[in-house]
Image: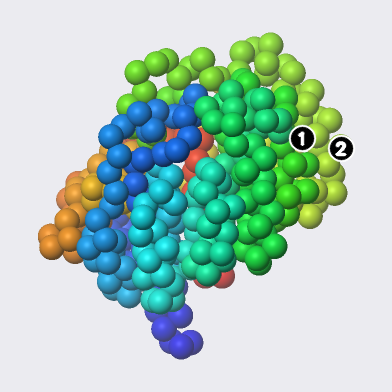
Amino acid sequence: MFVECWLMTIRALLNLASDRLTTLPLLILYLTDGCNSRCATCDIWRNPRRNMPLALARSLADAVDEMGVRWVLLSGGEAMQHPEWPAIAEMFRERGVRVLLLTNGLLVRRQAELVAQVVDELYVSLDAATPELYAAIRGVDAYDLVLEGIQQASAAGVPVTTRTTVQRRNYRQMPQIADAALRAGARAVSYLAVDTASQIAFGARPDDPSGDALSAQDCAALADLLDAFEVSHAAQFAAGQIAESPAKLRRTLLHYFRRDAAYTPPRCNAPRLSVVVECDGTIRPCYFLPSVGRLTPNGEPLGRVVNGQAAQALRAAVRQKQRPECERCVCPLYMSARALVRM
């Protein structure tokens, strides 16, 4: 086991030194592009619903050992709308992979027992601290339902993290969102800025998404709010219950929306650590970069596609800072060599 762990670590470190992947720690699956929310900041729910074929999911699970997959994140759309999502989760757990589920939370209360059986970590979107604002942003009246789902999952022993997409409608409720989530039993609360640039990450977006961004006046109010938030929730920041530090929130929210000199593009090596597989088998290096190929149940294996010419060229472009998507990314993933060794 010791030798196997070190071989896996060496393989992961090689990813950072080459545009060719020798291992794939994180696999992100869009199980469906159907969604039962009607979010104002995401148009994926407008698309015709498609589910990932079970055969495709099984072929990905079969690639776990070859590619050294450690985590799988089930996403969508709304992953829990896939009729076979528990079976897919179990496929990966049986192979020793840690299963993470990203959900809008609408079905968690109803399926809390299943969640506890097949999910290692639960990530729930929570974009408001009142039922009225939740309905305005998410398009459904389900605030209490989502909090009850968090309570049940947490009580069943599943670690829950909430994720808030910060935008002009809800930034004033950031402290109250943290309070509501933690009262419901969430282990941690996380915040990220609304994406106002990508036209591919969340389905076709015919409307101008820049209207979700904060104005100069909003940014001034956010600066004051973050100062007060740091003081009023000092204990929660110190305990890691709020995942980002006050300094990081200023960098990823305030300076991001201000577009000022204090904003710097985030550190990210997601294309060297993960891939996104959409429900039809389309592969992207991350949420925001274009496709590098497509898997089919009986087609090329995962390793060949992620190391194809298009995939390696795109990773090289990211490394050389030639991709504009990376300049304004709201959802970066970065792991240093030291972090990979600890992993």
Q: Where is residue 219 in the image (x, y as percent from the top left)?
A: 68, 18
Identify the image quadrant of residue 106. Answer: top right
Residue 313 visible in rendering:
no
Q: Position of residue 39 (x, y in %)?
A: 49, 29
Callouts 2 and 1 close, C-beta under 8 Å: yes
Query: In the image, what residue type sits under mark 2?
Result: Ser
The answer to which quarter of the image holds residue 128 is: top right
**Residue 169 percent coordinates (x, y):** 63, 21
Question: At 48% from the left edge and 17% from the top edge, which residue is drawn?
Answer: 210
* Circle 2: element type: helix
Quickly name the residue at label 2. Answer: 232
Residue farthest to the front?
110
* Rendered view: 99 above or below 147: below
Return the mark for residue 313: none
Q: Kindly identify the residue that appears in the image at 65 percent across and 65 percent down.
A: 156
Answer with left or right where residue 85 lies relative to residue 339: left
Q: In this view, does 184 lie above or below 60?
A: above
